[in-house]
Amino acid sequence: MKEFVDVVSFEIEAGHGGPGAVSFRREPYVPNGGPDGGPGGNGGNIIFLVDSRLTTFGSLRSKKKFIAENGVQGTARLSDGRKGEDVIIKVPCGTVIYDDDDGSVLVDLIEDEQIFIGAYGGKGGKGNKFYATPTNQAPDYAQHGLDGEKKNLRLEIKIIADIGFVGLPNAGKSSLLSAMTRANPKIASYPFTTLTPNLGVCYLDIDRSMVLADIPGIIEGAHKGVGLGFTFLRHIERTDILLYVLDITSESLFDDYQKLYNELLEYSQTLTEKKSFILLNKIDMIDEDECDMIYEDFLEKIEKQGIKNIINVFRISALASTFDTIRPIVEDFYRVLNIDKVAKKEDKKIKKAINEKSKYVFGPVNSKRLGHSLGIDVTPKKTCTYDCIYCQIGKNENTVISPIESVDADTVVFELKKHLHKYKDIDYITFSGSGEPTLYANIKHLIREIKNISDVPVCVITNGSLFYKQEIRSSIMLADLIIPSLDAGCEATFKKINMPNSAITFDKMVEGLISFSRVYKGRIWLEVFVIENVNDNMEEMKLISDIVSKMKVEKVQLLTADRPIAYKEYKPVSYEKLQELSKYFDCKVEVFGKPNYKKYGSNKEISDNDILALLQRHPTTKEGIAYSLQADISIIITLLAKLLEDKKIEIKNVDGDDCYQLI
């Protein structure tokens, strides 16, 4: 018999963060190079992954400790150290993970492919570049990496089944399971034939089935560990319905039931509150009149006890019955089980929505420029360095160009994994959203991690003005597609549109874009955002076209505002105007006017929170919301009416269209 292992204990230790580097830039023609030590890599995590194909902890029973790889030390030229490899521990459905030191429950894993990070790796240390200041220009020290988490864990399996059989040894539970399902449990005429839980699937028809569990026999004192004891009592906790299997030939039939009831009560009161059936087995061993008399007497005692949760009491011979004679019984099981599941379904849906809510990953949404894309928003609102006149977030007073660390990259990766498991046929994973993505300090590391877990192309949509900075250009080299913006062909128009920080000039931006295009190995599309009476003229487009000719640009995307603009005096241009301006480019040009939303999608289940999340990133029309969320337009209109009534959103007219935005 295959050994059943349902409890294991071991220690886990996540990897330590790699130390930062102490390094100074020494190159010809680079005076005063200064410190350039990069940060160390984060330590690897200890990850638990549910695998529905597993049924025991057999592969874990001999392991006493799991250790993840440490992060690698940073190197010169601001290069990050490599992240330590994660250790992935596969466990069966129904695994409960406890902290073995204090006995607390850390997680209950009940869904296939569910992920739990048991121990987080330590964060990598910062290199000496981080410590450079105007008064300390050559720091010769760096930060050590942080230690990874250590924990002592205990893992238990609690079998997930719809109906659990409980009874004294040799009551006929295994025979009953065999009669109701295709399971082949070991059956014999001595106590404790069943030493491990047996599962079987009862098929009523092609669309209806139940999972039945035969739990090893329970004897008096089981809740204290007598006999097989609480080793298998825990499995009954998972079941929705209990089936008490009793031997009708027993001289103490009702006492047998009370013994079982009391053992379950002593172990956990919730067990005795579950809906229950009673099955009096082995009726083929007594005559019919005696069977009727015992049955009536048993019902009378049940009624006197005032037990409320007993649904029905059946009589049967598990050995002498066929599935056709058992069918009325299992139909009754299914009926009660289905009632319970309808009641539980909404609770499960709510919990699932809470658990799956992502903070940094959104979508997938239908994008007019990138198809079916999954978005990543790693910079909070108002972190951009300019007051761009077409900004769809609003005016911004920040004039300091500095990287920000808004979120741990590993958090984004694990959010992304959940979406990649759920959705297929994604065209791009896109860095975009509320703020400028290239200002995220760890974008280089995050792109590398994304490419390690997915083959979906990575795209970065960014403000081309930032390309004057070498660190910005190098941070996105690993992406598959870059879409920088270039909205001006001369210094005067550049200042008018971008209102940039004084450190940025038009010539520096153009030089940065051209330098990037010469060394970048991926694809470049160039975004040109056109505004009425600003850059919608032949002279400006010719100047932009001259810059494009010096870059390795696959295509130019001409577009205008289809959402509220921060500055009211500026207006979008017509689609016809964009078509006319496209003639001044020698390369391929895509023109995007006001979108034509012909297909809104199916009746996909969405909530007002989905709409609020979308509007937080950009205001748009009801048609745009329906298209992006792939939802029926009538559903969107209903939800928008509710949000307007609750004063969570407002309507702003943009060039004749009603756009919805957050208040």
Image: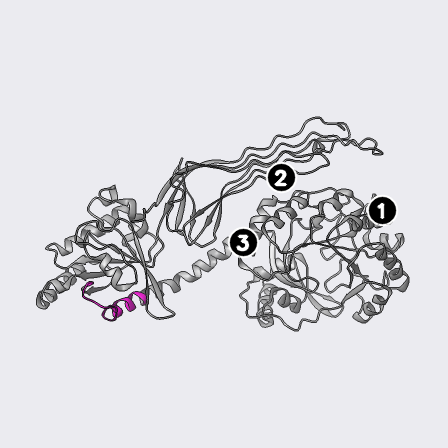
Alpha carbon distance from label 3 to label 2: 23 Å
The image shows residue 39, relative to residue 371, as above or below, that is above
Q: Mark 2 or mark 1: which is in front?
A: 2
Residue 277 shows up from this direction: no
- Residue visible at 17% across and 51% down in the picture: 190
Q: Residues within 10 Å of mark 3 (few under 14, many from 20)?
A: some
- Residue visible at 62% across and 70% down in the picture: 600
Mark found first going from the N terminus, 1 or 3: 3
The image shows residue 563, relative to residue 474, as above or below, that is below
Coloring applied to the structure: one colour
Residue 204 shows up from this direction: yes
Decide if residue 612 is on the left or right side of residue 592.
Answer: left
Alpha carbon distance from label 1 to label 3: 41 Å
x and y, in percent, of residue 445 in the image:
65, 44
Front one among 154 and 399: 154
Which secondary structure lies at badge 2? loop
Which secondary structure lies at badge 1? helix
Dot label at residue 508: 1
x and y, in percent, of residue 381 in the image:
68, 51
Magenta region:
318-334
Dot label at residue 82: 2
Dot label at residue 418: 3
What type is the residue that disc 2 sits on? Arg
Front one among 475 and 254: 475
The image shows residue 104, relative to residue 648, as above or below, that is above
